[in-house]
């Protein structure tokens, strides 16, 4: 995906930001597994170290993290999503930024989560994105990533009555795990599940990876229907 593709993704999420925020605000209430994984991530993050929500959308996951008492930083490509998050969750810090060039200092975050955000990257962009996550994590920091399982690309050109231009890249867990390991992570957990009743009919994968202790900080040169979650 080139800059034009990222611009299309940004414009699409800007277009649906308000409806997206209203629809997904309370989604974690019906996702006990997601909450458990997030709680585990928070528990393993050093006290006082900020936890990054990468591709945070309107910030409901970051807000849940902040509700545990942890410091949360939400980062999203869409300015409208960031604006919606700032209005709804004043206790969360939001930043506008791209997964390929995160607006964060080296080693700034204690851990990071990316729920269904890497699906908007081209497969060739994943190594750079994972290098950026590695760069911004502290030594031994954890990275929790979730995505749709498969090899297809689903395209959406209309969403809730709005014209959009979005590609949703499905990914194979073994391939993603290998890319994470190449970027300096050790994958500690792999999990797959079927979709919940209110979700799009896809299989979902979760990987929990740890920034390898002692590894140097690296420089970093959802589908049709209800696609995002």
Image: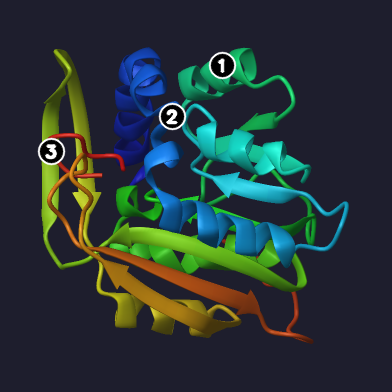
Left or right: where 8 falls relative to 106: left
State the image quarter where residue 45 is shown.
Answer: bottom right
State the image quarter where residue 125 is shown.
Answer: bottom left
Lower sequence index among marks 3 and 2 = 2
Q: Residue at x 39, y 59 (%)?
A: 146
Which labelled disc corresponds to residue 26?
Answer: 2
Real-space CA distance between mark 3 and mark 2, rounded to the nearest whole angstrom: 21 Å
Element assignment for label 2? loop
Q: Residue at x 70, y 51 (%)?
A: 51
Real-space CA distance between mark 1 and mark 2, rounded to the nearest whole angstrom: 18 Å
Q: Residue at x 54, y 83 (%)?
A: 188
Q: Quadrant of the C terminus?
A: top left
Left or right: where 170 falls relative to 34: left
Lower sequence index among marks 3 and 1 = 1
Residue 100: horizontal and vertical position, in percent? 52, 52
Mark 1 and mark 2 residues within 8 Å of each other at the beta carbon = no
Q: Residue tagged by mark 3? A: 224
Asked whether residue 220 is in view, the answer is no
Dot 1 alpha-carbon crowd within 10 angstroms: few under 14, some 14 to 19, many 20 or more: some
């Amino acid at each position: 995906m080139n800059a034009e593709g990222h611009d299309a993704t940004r414009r699409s999420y800007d277009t649906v930001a308000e409806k997206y925020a209203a629809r997904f605000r309370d989604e974690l209430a019906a996702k006990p597994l997601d909450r458990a994984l997030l709680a585990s991530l928070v528990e393993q993050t050093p006290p006082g170290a900020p936890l990054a929500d990468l591709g945070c959308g309107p910030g409901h996951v970051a807000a849940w993290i902040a509700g545990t008492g942890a410091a949360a930083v939400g980062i999203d490509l869409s300015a409208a999503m960031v604006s919606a998050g700032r209005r709804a969750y004043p206790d969360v810090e939001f930043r506008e930024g791209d997964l390929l060039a995160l607006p964060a200092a080296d080693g700034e975050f204690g851990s990071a989560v990316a729920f269904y955000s890497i699906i908007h990257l081209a497969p060739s962009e994943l190594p750079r994105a994972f290098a950026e996550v590695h760069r911004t994590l502290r030594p031994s920091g954890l990275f929790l990533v979730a995505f749709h399982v498969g090899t297809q690309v689903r395209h959406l050109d209309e969403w809730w009555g709005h014209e959009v231009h979005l590609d949703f890249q499905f990914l194979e867990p073994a391939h993603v795990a290998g890319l994470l390991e190449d970027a300096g992570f050790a994958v500690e957990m792999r999990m797959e599940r079927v979709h919940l009743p209110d979700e799009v009919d896809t299989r979902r994968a979760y990987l929990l990876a740890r920034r390898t202790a002692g590894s140097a900080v690296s420089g970093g040169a959802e589908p049709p229907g209800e696609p995002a979650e």
